[in-house]
Amino acid sequence: MKVAVVGATGNAGSRIVSELLQRGHHVTAIVRNPEKVPAKPNLTASKGDVFDTDGLAGLLRGHDAVVSTVHFTASDPEKLIAAVKASAVPRYIVVGGAGSLEVAPGLKLFDTPNFPAAYLAEARKGGAFLDLLRQESALNWTFISPSAFFIPGERTGKFRLGTDQLLTAPDGKSSISFEDYAVALVDELEKPAHACKRFTVGY
């Protein structure tokens, strides 16, 4: 596939690019600073602005899928969605957050008393982005939430998938490595199973 990755040099984005290339896909890395993208076969770096709807749509056009890995507080979800729709790319994958996952019926992680204040704005904007996507009837989207701890680690290929509830391991920890998250995301691209849905990945 030809896949455009918006925000390709970040923690998640760089791992997603590596996973896509490893599986033989062609990747366009859309970033603010293309010179920071290392030269690799089947990888093209393009300069893009997530707030420029028309310009971004032009960069996305002709791809089989778009993966958005930009921070929610550093982008405008309405402009991103508009750019994807204008580009007519048939698949849109959003790297989501864990904050909007439920830890009990009706209780989202970002509404719990101990949720870190430093991450609250990002988490709430991620939840708002998901709400916007759920109103879209003309867009084939998937929103993939990581677990609470989204960290550098190993590519094990061993993890669990869930829906709207936070996944926790037997020891009570909720985590996923950037590397294994990338595996789950590219699996979804290659074998779509969550059209117009959110799912989560964790150990």
Image: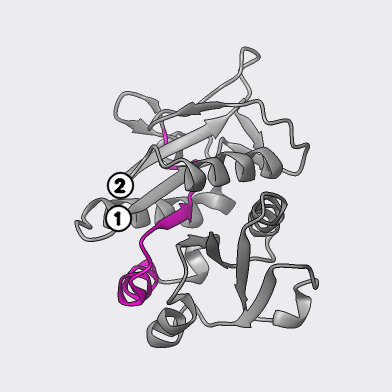
User: Eyeballing the image, is 4 above or below 125?
Assistant: below
User: Residue at coordinates 31% horizontally, 77% vertically from top-left?
Assistant: 86
Disc 2 versus disc 1: distance between alpha carbons? 8 Å
Q: Magenta segment: does it hold 176?
A: no
User: Residue at coordinates 30% horizontally, 47% vertically from top-left?
Assistant: 196
Contact flag, marks 2 and 1 (Cβ < 8 Å): yes
Indicate the amino acid at tag 2. Cys
Indicate the amino acid at tag 1. Leu
Name the residue that disc number 1 marks: 133
Res. 72 visible in picture: yes
**Label 2 secondary element:** loop
Q: Position of residue 126 (x, y in %)?
A: 43, 54
Neighbours of disc 1 within 10 Å: few (<14), some (14-19), many (20+):
many
User: Residue at coordinates 69% horizontally, 81% vertically from top-left?
Assistant: 33
User: Residue at coordinates 50% horizontally, 45% vertically from top-left?
Assistant: 190
Q: Position of residue 193 (x, y in %)?
A: 39, 37
Foreground residue among 169 and 137? 137
Foreground residue among 85 and 120? 85
Name the residue that disc number 2 marks: 196
Neighbours of disc 2 within 10 Å: few (<14), some (14-19), many (20+):
some
